[in-house]
Image (cartoon, helix red, strand yellow):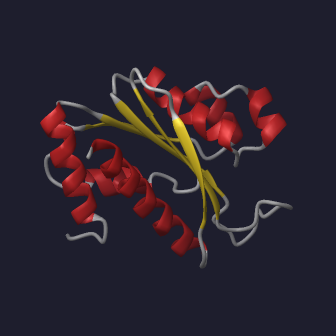
Amino acid sequence: MVTSFEAAVLALAERLRARGQRLATAESCTGGLIAAACTSVAGSSDWFERGFVTYSNEAKVEALGVPAALIAAHGAVSEPVVLAMAEGALARSPADLAVAVTGIAGPGGAVPGKPVGTVWLALAQRGRAARAWLCRFDGDRTAVREQTVVEALRALNDVLS
C-alpha cells in the first residue's frame, strides 16, 4: 500500500540508515499517525525505534516524564510541554532522534489563544538542544492531523539533510 507520506518516509529512512541512527516519536494529537507512517514502509525496523502515544496528560507524565506542574502551568498544547515530550522520548529510549507533537485537532478543544489547528512540534537529538515550533493548520480534524504528520516528516528530513 502506498501512503501519501511514503516519499518523505523513504527519504527519512535513507538518511537515518546512512547515519546508523534510530527514531522515536512522542505523539498526542496525531495518535500514532507519525509512527504508522514510518512503519508503513518495509525495513522500518532498521531505523524506527519506538513510538509513544501520549494522548492524555497523565500519559505524558507517566510515559514521557513530562512534569505535571509544567502541564498545569502552560497547558498540554505548549512549547514547554512539547519540548519535554521530545526530551522524554529520548530519555526513555535508545533512539538518537525524537519528534514530538501536541495540538488541538478539533472539532472541539479550542481555548482562547489556542484555536483548532494549533500544533506544537519539537525535535530532540542526542547531544543537542531540543527545538520547538508552532504551526497553525487549517481544515477539519483529519486535515489538521495529516498536516501535522507532513510537517513532522519534513522537519525530520530537514534536520538530517
Q: Residue 20: percent from the left, percent from the top?
A: 17, 30
Q: Which residue is drawn at 70% across and 49% down?
A: 77
Above or below, 50 against 33 in this view is: above
Q: Residue 144: percent from the left, percent from the top?
A: 56, 69
Above or below, 27 against 115 in this view is: above
Horizontal side, residue 143 vs residue 19: left or right: right
Question: Could you tell me if residue 28 is visible in this image?
Answer: no
Horizontal side, residue 36 vs residue 138: left or right: left
Q: Residue at x 58, y 55 (%)?
A: 29
Q: Which residue is drawn at 45% across and 51% down?
A: 32
Q: How many labels does the image show?
A: 0
Question: Could you tell me if residue 77 is visible in this image?
Answer: yes
In the foreground, 90 or 131: 131
Q: Residue 142: percent from the left, percent from the top?
A: 53, 73
Q: In which quarter of the image is residue 56?
A: top right
In the foreground, 155 or 147: 155
Horizontal side, residue 57 vs residue 155: left or right: right
In the foreground, 134 or 57: 134
Which image quarter is the N terminus in? bottom left
Above or below, 101 against 128 in this view is: below
Q: Which residue is drawn at 15% across and 47% down?
A: 14
Above or below, 95 against 154 in this view is: above
Q: Residue furthest front?
A: 161
Q: In which quarter of the image is residue 126?
A: top left
